[in-house]
Amino acid sequence: MTTRPVGLHIDQNVGAAYIQINDKPVARTVEVTADVLVDLDALDMVVGVEILNLTSEIPIGQIERQFHIHSDAVALLQKIRPSVASFYTSFSTSAGSATNTTVSCEAVQPC
């Protein structure tokens, strides 16, 4: 099992995204804001971040304070901020746009 960032999955149809931090099973989900949910494993480490509105800001500081998260995962979130929509706009300009997109971690940072 890896603990490295895995990818960013964007669904333009519903205007949501999932930032997968690692591939551990999700034990529980916690609402951070109305538009941001954090998936945690059995040890309360961040597994992923679900963004329900692509224009919502990712509350990185709050996620760092409230949950256990690796520094490389924080670096990944910082590269995507302020929102998935702004990251996707810059990414899709160079890569072409699609309704559903999976961005590998290599596109955001070296894996």
Image (spheres, helix red, strand yellow):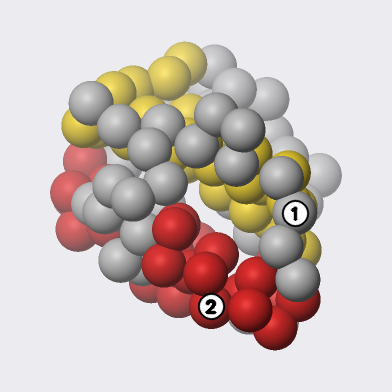
Q: Nearer the viewer, residue 95 or 79?
A: 95
Task: Kindly state the secondary structure of the residue where label 1 is placed.
Answer: loop
Residue 67 against residue 101 in the figure, above or below: above
Position of the N terminus by quadrant: top right
Residue 29 x, y percent position in the rendering:
43, 19
- Looking at numbered disc 2 in the image, what kind of residue is underneath it? Ser
Give residue 2's mark: none
Q: Is residue 106 left or right of residue 29?
A: right
Provide residue 69's location: percent of width, then percent of height.
Answer: 41, 52
Query: What residue lies at 75% left-to-right and 54% top-to-bottom?
Result: 98
Quarter of the picture containing the C terminus is bottom right
* Earlier sequence position, callout 1 versus callout 2: 2
Query: What residue lies at 75% left-to-right and 71% top-to-bottom?
Result: 96
In the image, is 28 to the left or to the right of 34? right
Badge 1: residue crowd in 10 Å (few <14, some 14–19, many ≥20): few
Q: Nearer the viewer, residue 63 or 33?
A: 33
Pinpoint residue 77: horizontal percent, then vertical percent.
43, 63
Identify the residue at image location x=24%, y=32%: 32
- The residue pinned by badge 2 equals 90
Q: Looking at the image, can residue 60 be seen?
A: yes
Q: Secondary structure at mark 2?
A: helix
